[in-house]
Amino acid sequence: MPQNQPSSHAVRGFLTIGTLYSYLYCMLASNVMLSMPILGGALYLAGQTIILIFSLRRPVQEGIVSKLMQRMGTVLLLILFVLLLLLMTVYPIRLDSADFWRLAGIVLCIVLRPGITRYAVERAVLARKKTMQILLRIAGVQLLFLPLLLMMLLLSPLDRLTVWALLGGYLLSGILESFPLERMQEHLRPYTEEDKQEIQALRGVHAYRMFQNMMLVVAAALQITQVMSYTYIAVTADALIVCMTIALLCTYAASLLTDALMRRRRIREQDPNFLLMAGLAIWLYGIVLFTRSLDLPGSVNGYLALALCTGGATVCVRILVWLEEDMRRVAAFGIGHAPGGAMDMAQQVRISFSSLLGQMVALAGLTLINIFTATDFPNDWDVAFRSFSPLLTLPALILVGVAILFALRFPLTRQHLEKLHKYMDLQQEGQENVPLHDQLEAVVVKKSLKRYGIKAILFILRPLYRHKIIGKENVQLDPDTPCVFVCNHGEIYGPVVATLYVPFSFRPWVAYEITDVNAIAERTMNGTFQNVKGFWRRPLNWIMIKIGAPFLAWVMKSVDCIPVYHDNPRKLMQTFRDTVSAMQAGDNILLFPENADTSVDHRYVREGVSEFFTGFTMIGQLYNNKTGKCPLFVPVYANKRKRTITFGAPTRYNPDIPANEEKERLCDYLRGEMLKIAGTEQQEK
């Protein structure tokens, strides 16, 4: 993770609160003129969706929008036509036609204003106009619609104070909508054939595609949630100022808090979507609270739901902004060169399409609320909204749930992103690291999933094996040279506790028998359950073959183990090759070299350390021959009686000592340190 505030690109357009104020203004105007606030919101969303559909015509013509998105766009256009037909035919009949069309005219002014403002700002920027000239153009667009708006308001039966209040709200929403000028700049150049090829290549980068899917679902969920929240604000007129204050404070406080947390090293060391999952969980709970607790206007539960939704959604958006810079590195790795402007433009198009989808769903919900409640709740729209709020909350709930699934499936961890950053730096220096490239390609380009099942199992097991970590300060990780952690076995105890509590990333060595389903079943039945005879042996054997062995094999695969073929010299060399490649890619190694056959009962000792197999020390020699670097060997002792994991003083492989002597030195030193930690060195002597 970068330590400073990242440069944002397309994702920053998520938090466009100015347009939401325009939506809120339309609802308030509709409430004042017709006592039907949700009708104004529905008309505004209808206009916004039409503008979005027309804005997507150019990307469609230039082949940026995929065929699937084009088909979905056609379906959305048909749905929009039906919804507009309902709004424009049902309500003029039910209401005073003049009042309805006056409201429609006001909404039309609000909808057209940002598009014209954007066009004026773009032209001014391309002409290199000064800031004051740009501001004058924005003011000119505001004044362009002001006479028309004033005429419609003066022709209405509203009192003059209300008219001036609505004019003031129009100007305020226009200022808020026009404030972020940099978001109104667009690339006007046509897409070239190279751009199209680049976008097509990006679709083949799995990690980038997963990020895009997650981002698009969040964009659609955000649109519906914002409509839901601001509709609640508009219909609770008595608590309008309080609700607006809560929404603003939660948006900006969550943004500042997220950025502050992401700058902290301890947080950055977590997986990149660690805070994203937290934000989605808060967001999801806020929507659930909206669904269950919208009892009275201005209620504590309503305030809390509003705060959780706006705060959780803001956290998610800020995390996506932070991740976007990493995704540029992912894209560069996947397509072999730094992505150009086509990537940003294609991403903005996808966000616009996803926003369109969210707005269409929200529009459908508002239209149905209007149709179902126009006669039943003519003067009590807060009751109407609460009664039919599932039309908005249920789609938002589903989309946030889908976003959580995408976040769980996101394949890249913190270690992957750090390795990617390292690889890109090596490339800039003209160096190449083939093992690192192959490892990154397996998770960045090819389809891969993060295995959260094993994380859940480890989370459940940790309280059962609570241990204290001692001597962590002895391990000073070198980013250029990985470590080999050497731990005692202690039956199954050492591997389990080390996997749970060693506070460094690693890939463990495991016997190949517990990575193969058939071998696991055979070894378990002839070892652990060898005393089970008679009737119970057959069902136990079936359980091991069908359930136990597949589960253990999945666990071993999930921890990304390296199989050790201790009884096959040819395959054992493959173990060492895989180990050296993993170390070249930046992985640490965890192994358990005790030889149980040297004990009296041919079992791993529970206290102390058995004699070592010495072959593991070849890792140092092979890694040194391959890279010219000397890895660290770190002794680790898991003490079951004291419930501690202790890291001893490490030693570095010394290539100047003859190989056999260095092998003996490493084994003697590591075992001696482990015995010293265990407090059994005197017994050995």
Image: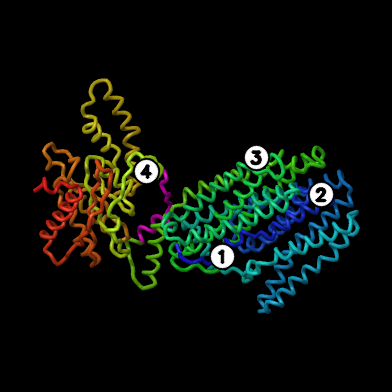
Task: Indicate yes or no whether the magenta region holds residue 485.
Answer: no
- Amino acid under disc 4: Leu
- Residue at left offset 53%, top offset 52%: 214
User: Along the polypeptide, which appears first: circle 4 or circle 1?
Assistant: 1
- Amino acid under disc 3: Ser
Image position, residue 294 (x, y; %): 67, 41
The residue indicated by pointer 3 is 293
Q: Which residues are magenta?
A: 437-454
Identify the secondary structure beneath mark 1.
loop
Given this view, does label 3 or label 4 mark the residue nearer the observer?
Answer: 3
- Amino acid under disc 1: His
- Residue at left offset 15%, top offset 54%: 667
- Binning the other alpha carbons within 10 Å of mark 1 as few (below 14), some (14 to 19) or many (20 upward) gives some
Q: Are marks 1 and 2 in contact (CB under 8 Å)?
A: no
Image position, residue 26 (x, y; %): 77, 55
- Residue at left offset 11%, top offset 45%: 683
Identify the secondary structure beneath mark 2.
helix
What secondary structure characterizes most of the magenta part? helix
The residue indicated by pointer 1 is 9
The residue indicated by pointer 2 is 88
Q: Are marks 2 and 3 in contact (CB under 8 Å)?
A: no
Up the image or down, 114 lies above or below 681; here it is below
Total number of numbered discs in the rendering: 4
Cα distance between the residues tagged 4 and 2? 58 Å
Task: Indicate yes or no whether the magenta region holds residue 440.
Answer: yes
Cα distance between the residues tagged 4 and 1? 37 Å
Residue 334 placement: quadrant: bottom left
Image position, residue 241 (x, y; %): 72, 53
Q: Which mark is residue 458?
A: 4
